Amino acid sequence: MNNHPASRLLLLFLQAFVGITAVAGGVALIAGALDPGLATVLSPPVSHLAGTPFTGYLVPGILLAIGLGGVHLVALRMLVARHPLALTAAAVAAFDTTIWIFVELIVMTFSPFQVLYLAAGLTEFGLVLLMLGLLGRRSAPLAA
């Protein structure tokens, strides 16, 4: 992990960005679901949930805050502490982001933010692979 200080810094930034914004977004969705007066300010229209198993934003808000934001913040903390499983946690967080966005793209109205978060998740994957030495490695030619 020490061989890639720039990759580590970028991964730390992405984990913090996704983690903090997912928790903030989840809290906003929860607040909008619990106080209908805030719903128009803090939540997209409920019509965006058509075709999903949800009738409101309470459960998606909890899932966003804990399932996406919380996972990223745990992975961030592990990377800061240089925990031996930090890159595994980072890979889980990246997978979490890409799955979250793919599901959103399938069931909800398109938003440019989805492109931003998909790019963040894919970049996290690339950084993890780079830091593990699995990207950018030249392989020896096969013997005949």
Image (spheres, rainbow, N blue to C red):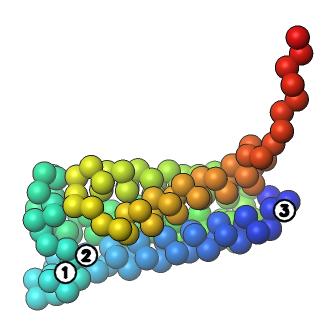
Q: Is any part of residue 77 visible from this angle?
A: no
81 or 13, which lies in front?
A: 13
Residue plotted at (10% across, 83% down): 36
**Looking at numbered disc 1 in the image, what kind of residue is underneath it?**
Gly
| Residue topped by disc 2 | 29
Between the residue at mark 1 and the residue at mark 2, the CA separation in whole angstroms equals 5 Å
> Where is residue 41 shown, x and y percent of the image?
20, 86
Q: In which quadrant of the rendered view does residue 58 lie? A: bottom left
Residue plotted at (65% across, 66% down): 11
Between the residue at mark 2 and the residue at mark 3, the CA separation in whole angstroms equals 38 Å
Residue plotted at (37% across, 56% down): 101
Q: Residue furthest top?
A: 144
| Residue topped by disc 1 | 32
The quadrant the C terminus occupies is top right
Q: Is any part of residue 57 visible from this angle?
A: yes
Secondary structure beneath label 2: helix
Q: Is residue 131 left or right of residue 54?
A: right
Marks 1 and 2: CB-CB under 8 Å?
A: yes
Instruction: Return the disc, 3 or 1, that comes first in the chain's sequence.
Output: 3
